[in-house]
Image: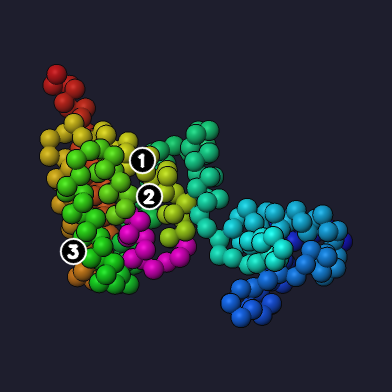
Amino acid sequence: MSEGADDLLIRIIEIAMRVRPDENGRVRLPTERELADVLEVQRPTVRERLTVLETLGFVTRRQGSGTYLSLPNAQVLQFYFEVSLKLGFLSLEQIQKALEMIGMEMAMTAAIDASRDELDQLDQILIKMSDADSIDAFAQCQLDFHLGLARASHNPVVSLIIDGLTSVIRAVMTNRVRMISVVKDSFGRSVASHRTVVQALRDHEPELARMALQECFALWRRESAKISMLYVSE
């Protein structure tokens, strides 16, 4: 029987989904031999595919217990984006543009679905942002704001993507904050623009939330433009 790798991976997950959870709510996959019989492939092929699924975070192997279905995490995405950035397949500018596009959707959805606790957490992040006394601390607050916005959107796909982009977004934020740090009061203006986003979320105004977040990015571009003017004036 000839199967593509993707077909086998999907079929293994489909088989696992038909297994009844145990008393602890865990789904234990059939043995390698059983899977090989059902899939009509050799055991080494099954073992190889299970290794791929484990790497992707879809299964967990427990010595002496078996292989269990698990929720995927963002580690694979993190690795992909980090390596792609280092090898030059992606640029910080491209990541920045993607973050803006995703951010618009997050803001609009969060304006509808965000809970009061999630909005309060965003306010707490803004307080820390106001008190930040270093470039790294301010950049971390900006990253935390976007992570909080992703959670508030209640979209697991968006959350997974943002989690996968975390280390890359941190690089983008740090680079951006370092650039604008030489502009007087740039941090204060950034905090104020983020506060506008949270207020739009509290008012349940999706379009205003989108525009407010868009202004955050536009503000950064204006602050960056001022840097060139500073050097010209010197």
Say which of 116 and 219 sits in front.
116
Q: Is residue 146 above or below residue 110?
A: above
Q: Quadrant of residue 29?
A: bottom right
Q: Residues within 10 Å of mark 3 (few under 14, many from 20)?
A: some
Kind of element beneath mark 1: helix
Q: Quadrant of residue 43?
A: bottom right
* CA–CA distance in space, label 3 to label 1: 25 Å
Q: Earlier in the sequence, mark 2 or mark 3?
A: 2
Q: Residues within 10 Å of mark 2 (few under 14, many from 20)?
A: some
| Disc 2 target residue | 99
* Quadrant housing the N terminus: bottom right
Say which of 15 and 90 sits in front.
15
Extent of the magenta region: 146-158
User: What's the mark number on residue 230?
Assistant: none
| Disc 1 target residue | 172
Q: Is residue 155 above or below residue 18?
A: above
Say which of 173 and 109 sits in front.
173
| Disc 3 target residue | 199
Kind of element beneath mark 2: helix
* Tag 2–tag 1 contact (CB < 8 Å): yes
Residue at 61% over, 81% down: 23
| Residue furthest front as drawn | 64
